[in-house]
Amino acid sequence: MKIYTRTGDDGTTGLCAGPRVAKDHSRIEACGTLDELNASIGVVRAELLPRDIDQLLCRVQHELFTVGAGLAMPGLAEAGGHGVGSQHVKELEQAIDQYNAQLPDLNAFILPGGTRAASTLHLARTVCRRAERRVVSLGVASEQSPEGLWALRYLNRLGDLLFVLPRVLNARAQVADECWRKDL
């Protein structure tokens, strides 16, 4: 496989089995932000993580490729292709509930930080929220696209998970979350 094709030298790129579009097209922007999110999670996984969290994040990375494929190939679900769906969202919800049960109740905003691994997860969470906004900008929800609707649900739950997991890592390392102090 040749890495460079020169076909993008004019500022366009090809959608999977679709037309060429500008590299700043909203669909490409959404896919690119998903790629950035996946890379951010890869940075997290380069840290020394507990096995359970590393395995969960590995699964998430694979699922993010599936989300991206659904967005890059409009009509994938209608054609019988595989995408994220209710089971993926349910699994994220179960993980959120499982890990959140290990934490004390939160009654204040917390600052992103703590251990290095927790801090990188907080950063991945912000990229996840941006990816979610890019999918909204794509307008797939208004089109009632199955890929877009499930991508939004998946990213929304993933953002929640990426809020809980840094708190878990900090708690396991006995590093307290720092609460926001509005008086400073």
Image (cartoon, rainbow, N blue to C red):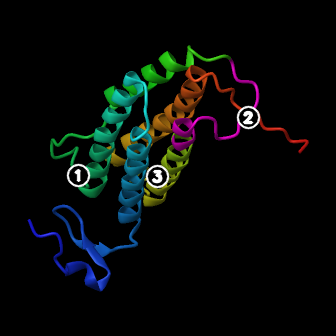
**Taken as a whole, is the magenta stretch helix, strand or loop?**
loop
| Label 1 Cα neighbours within 10 Å, binned few <14 / some 14-19 / many ≥20 | some
Near-viewer residue (116 or 180): 116
Q: Amino acid at mark 2?
A: Phe
Whether residue 86 is visible, yes or no, is: no
Say left or right for 171 vs 10. right
- Of mark 3 and mark 2, the one earlier in the sequence is 2
* Residue matched to label 3: 131
* Residue matched to label 1: 75
* Spot occupied by residue 167 in the image (x, y as percentages of width and height): 59, 28
Near-viewer residue (161 or 29): 161
**Disc 3 element:** helix
Q: Which mark, residue 109? A: 2
Instruction: Please state the extent of the stretch shown in magenta in the rendering.
Output: 105-120
Query: Magenta includes 106?
Result: yes
Name of the residue lying farthest toward the bottom: 10
Q: Which mark, residue 152? A: none
Say left or right for 168 vs 104. left
What separation in Å lies between label 1 and label 2 (alpha carbons)? Answer: 40 Å
* Spot occupied by residue 20 in the image (x, y as percentages of width and height): 24, 74
Q: Residue at x 44, y 22 (%)?
A: 95
Residues at marks 3 and 1 touching, judged by CB atoms closer than 8 Å? no
Q: Amino acid at mark 3?
A: Ala
Judge depth for marks 3 and 1 and give the one in front.
3
Q: Residue at x 25, y 78 (%)?
A: 8
